[in-house]
Image: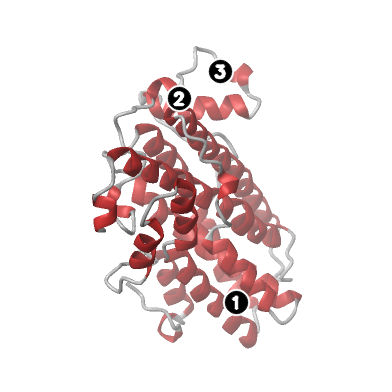
């Protein structure tokens, strides 16, 4: 098993003023103000009003005539909403997909006999996830303040991965199958979330506060991916043939949801903004057969499944 670090604030580069500001704000909100020995950089002061909040190439309608013909303020509002939705997606997945799966492991709900080492590791990861949620909450809050637009999280629907997880667990035949489904969705989310975060972390076009938030989060997730990978292998070895089949189906279901653009969220956003032709634009994007999946890199899950000897048996088109 990969050695785990003690729970702490995310690692950051003290020479990077934006990373320092993100972590300092996180520390202040977490009740550790006394540990800060020097004046804290201000996230708001580092916000660059001239930078985009979200890259155009990740918008599923970026090449649509309706989007290209909008006023720049309307495009800015859509990009700001996209960033709020990105953060909500991360926060909902961390809180309602990842942590419930880790909690199953921590309490050995699948009766796999996992010991203290794994229990400590997942509890450490769960502490990290609270930090990550707070970082993304801070990032959305500074965007709302600086842009002057309300953009409340609760105006948006539950994210697609969470909706699909809830439907899958509701369809499960019994509590054990529900637990295995929950575990499968956690496995995909933790091993693959770096691929989602990578969409933002190194894009120089967008807001430096946004990039720093995602970059800091991503450093922890490389460690978490190894935890989830180790645990998935151990759990799989203890499952019955029927439970193994259910787990693999859960992985496919989770990857399908995790990779997709969430058009329900986009329909809500254009409705809030009262954009003429906006609903038709989202419909066109949703039914565009040339449109690629948002997240395409499931290399970590593929590696896990190859290790388990089942990659070729799964009904998933590996990129």
Query: Mark 3 or mark 2: which comes first in sequence?
Result: 3
Residue at image x 34%, y 27%?
48
Q: Position of residue 188 (x, y in %)?
A: 51, 65
| Nearer-the-camera pick, 240 or 179 | 179
Q: Is residue 268 left or right of residue 196?
A: right
Q: Which mark is residue 237?
A: 1
Question: Taking the image as drawn, is residue 312 in sight?
Answer: yes
Please state which of the two labelled residues, at mark 2 or mark 1, is closer to the viewer.
2
Per the image, label 1 sits on a secondary structure element best described as helix
Please state which of the two labelled residues, at mark 3 or mark 2, is closer to the viewer.
2
| Nearer-the-camera pick, 19 or 287 | 287
Please state which of the two labelled residues, at mark 1 or mark 3, is closer to the viewer.
3
Please rate how many residues cluster around mark 3, counting C-alpha atoms within 10 Å: few if below 14, some from 14 to 19, many from 20: few
Question: Taking the image as drawn, is residue 186 in sight?
Answer: no
Residue 44 position by quadrant? top left
Query: Mark 1 or mark 3: which comes first in sequence?
Result: 3
Q: What is the spatial separation of the Cα atoms under label 1 and label 3, in whole angstroms?
A: 46 Å
Residue 51 lies, with reference to residue 292, above or below; the image says above
| Residue at numbered disc 3 | 36
Q: Position of residue 124 (x, y in %)?
A: 62, 46
Q: Position of residue 282 (x, y in %)?
A: 38, 61
Answer yes or no: do the residues labelled 2 and 1 have beta carbons within 8 Å?
A: no
Image quadrant holding the C terminus, namely bottom left
| Residue at numbered disc 2 | 43
Residue at image x 40%, y 32%?
209
Image quadrant holding the N terminus, namely bottom right
Residue 246 position by quadrant? bottom right
């Amino acid at each position: 098993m990969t050695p785990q670090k003690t729970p702490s604030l995310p690692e950051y580069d003290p020479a990077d003023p934006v990373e320092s500001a993100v972590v300092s704000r996180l520390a202040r909100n977490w009740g550790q103000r006394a540990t800060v020995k020097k004046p804290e950089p201000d996230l708001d002061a580092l916000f660059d009003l001239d930078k985009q909040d979200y890259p155009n190439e990740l918008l599923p309608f970026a090449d649509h005539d309706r989007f290209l013909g909008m006023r720049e303020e309307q495009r800015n509002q859509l990009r700001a909403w996209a960033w709020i939705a990105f953060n909500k997606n991360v926060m909902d997945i961390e809180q309602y997909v990842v942590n419930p799966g880790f909690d199953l492991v921590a309490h050995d709900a699948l009766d796999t006999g996992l010991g203290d080492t794994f229990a400590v590791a997942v509890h450490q990861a769960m502490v990290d996830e609270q930090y990550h949620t707070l970082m993304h909450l801070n990032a959305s809050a500074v965007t709302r303040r600086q842009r002057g637009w309300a953009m409340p999280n609760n105006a948006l629907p539950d994210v697609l991965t969470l909706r699909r997880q809830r439907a899958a667990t509701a369809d499960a035949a019994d509590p054990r199958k529900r637990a295995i489904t929950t575990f499968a969705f956690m496995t995909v989310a933790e091993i693959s979330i770096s691929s989602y975060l990578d969409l933002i972390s190194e894009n120089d076009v967008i807001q430096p506060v946004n990039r720093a938030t995602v970059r800091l989060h991503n450093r922890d997730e490389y460690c978490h991916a190894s935890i989830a990978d180790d645990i998935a292998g151990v759990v799989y070895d203890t499952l019955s043939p029927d439970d193994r089949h259910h787990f693999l189906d859960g992985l496919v279901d989770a990857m399908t949801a995790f990779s997709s653009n969430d058009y329900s969220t986009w329909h809500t956003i254009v409705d809030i903004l009262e954009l003429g032709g906006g609903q038709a634009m989202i419909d066109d994007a949703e039914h565009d057969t040339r449109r690629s999946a948002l997240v395409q890199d499931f290399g970590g899950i593929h590696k896990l499944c190859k290790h388990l000897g089942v990659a070729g048996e799964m009904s998933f088109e590996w990129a």
